[in-house]
């Protein structure tokens, strides 16, 4: 059973199509990154999944339940960190988490959740009106985790967080995934998605233009990483046959080996050494995620990549 499944999911506002025929499958237990620029249709998709708005066409299920006709069953099993959420300014952080636990009738401990997101006991006693934006984001994450949800839906979860908060958010996502929770992670920040996600879907102007791992998308787009080696002699044939290697060439005396699979790096170095060639130095020229995104959303000089 897929955690999320949509079929021809479409939302129109008059003559404007915010989401156009979305066919998406998110596997149970994976961390799926939903990537797109602001206005691409990410929040519209989430609003449709949560039945906050109704589709113009198509349908969706979450954990096997129809999002329109089985709303209660869906909401009992998910945790949500929405973009632009509202909190009760006069209420304490602790009361917010207590309320979230009461609403879920599920497992969880107030103090554990507060500590897990990086808030302190004194923070929890303060009214939310005194919180910074980053503290509010942490609190919203604690509320999303209440009740041990089977699916976490996170819309721009790193918004307002400092580097430490972003690191903690990533750790939480990995911990939840390790425990079997499915995480649907929507963001316009490529580096956040790449750091935690098993697969990525790229949404552009309401259309899903690609779905794969970061490595798979890079390989299909021809935007790969290179291992650049300074060697003291020629390398015999065989590099091209290594798993994950997509290109081998020399440039100004340097051996440049393109790869799609990060695990290929060690094999490349071992192969060169086994050929009796000394590796004097090496560097890694990583593909720019911005470059990858550009290929899938606006096309490249060869006409772009179809999905």
Image: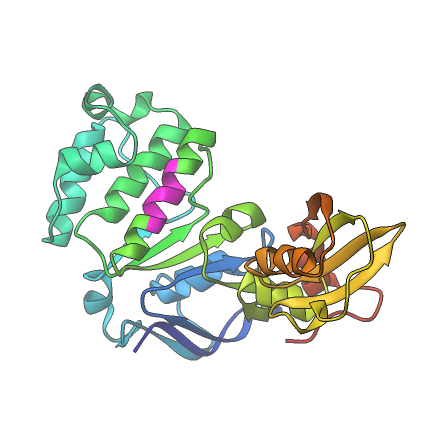
Q: Position of residue 7 (x, y in %)?
A: 44, 80
Magenta segment range? 168-174
| Residue at horizontal 60 percent and vertical 53 percent from the top | 37
Residue nearest the viewer, comparing 179 with 52: 179
- The colour scheme of the drawn protein is rainbow
Instruction: Locate residue 147 relative to residue 247 in the image: left or right.
Output: left
| Residue at horizontal 46 percent and vertical 56 percent from the top | 197
Q: Quadrant of residue 95?
A: top left
Residue nearest the viewer, comparing 211 with 105: 211
5 lies above or below 278 = below
Quadrant that contains the C terminus: bottom right
Outermost residue on the right side: it is: 252
Q: Position of residue 304 (x, y in %)?
A: 76, 69
Residue nearest the viewer, comparing 66 with 12: 66
Residue nearest the viewer, comparing 174 with 268: 268
| Residue at horizontal 20 percent and vertical 27 percent from the top | 92
Quadrant that contains the N terminus: bottom left
Residue 81 shows in this picture: no
Q: Quadrant of residue 58?
A: bottom left
Instruction: Locate residue 272 relative to residue 77 in the image: left or right.
Output: right
Residue 170 shows in this picture: yes
| Residue at horizontal 21 percent and vertical 19 percent from the top | 122
Look at the image and say whether residue 71 sits in the magenta stretch: no
């Amino acid at each position: 059973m897929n955690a999320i499944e949509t079929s021809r999911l479409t939302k129109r506002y008059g003559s404007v199509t915010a989401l156009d025929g979305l066919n998406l499958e998110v596997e149970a237990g994976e961390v799926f990154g939903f990537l797109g620029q602001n206005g691409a249709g990410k929040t519209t998709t989430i609003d449709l999944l949560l039945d906050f708005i109704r589709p113009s066409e198509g349908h969706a299920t979450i954990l096997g339940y129809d999002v329109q006709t089985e709303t209660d069953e869906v909401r009992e099993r998910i945790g949500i960190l929405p973009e632009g959420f509202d909190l009760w300014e006069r209420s304490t952080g602790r009361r917010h988490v207590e309320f979230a636990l009461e609403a879920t009738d599920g497992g969880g401990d107030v103090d554990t959740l507060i500590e897990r997101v990086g808030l302190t006991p004194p923070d929890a006693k303060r009214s939310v009106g005194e919180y910074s934006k980053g503290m509010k984001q942490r609190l919203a994450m604690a509320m999303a985790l209440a009740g041990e949800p089977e699916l976490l839906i996170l819309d721009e979860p790193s918004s307002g967080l400092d580097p430490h908060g972003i690191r903690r958010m990533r750790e939480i996502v990995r911990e939840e995934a390790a425990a079997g929770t499915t995480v649907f992670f929507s963001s316009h920040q490529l580096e956040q998605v790449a750091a935690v996600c098993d697969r990525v879907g790229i949404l552009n102007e309401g259309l899903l233009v690609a779905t794969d791992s970061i490595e798979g998308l890079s390989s299909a787009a021809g935007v790969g990483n290179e291992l650049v080696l300074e060697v003291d002699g020629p390398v015999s044939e065989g590099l091209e046959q290594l798993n994950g290697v997509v290109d081998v060439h020399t440039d100004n005396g340097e051996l440049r080996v393109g790869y799609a699979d990060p695990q290929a790096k060690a094999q490349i170095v071992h192969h060169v050494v086994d050929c009796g060639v000394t590796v004097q130095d090496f560097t890694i020229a990583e593909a720019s995620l911005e470059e990858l995104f550009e290929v899938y959303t606006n096309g490249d000089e060869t006409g772009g990549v179809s999905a």
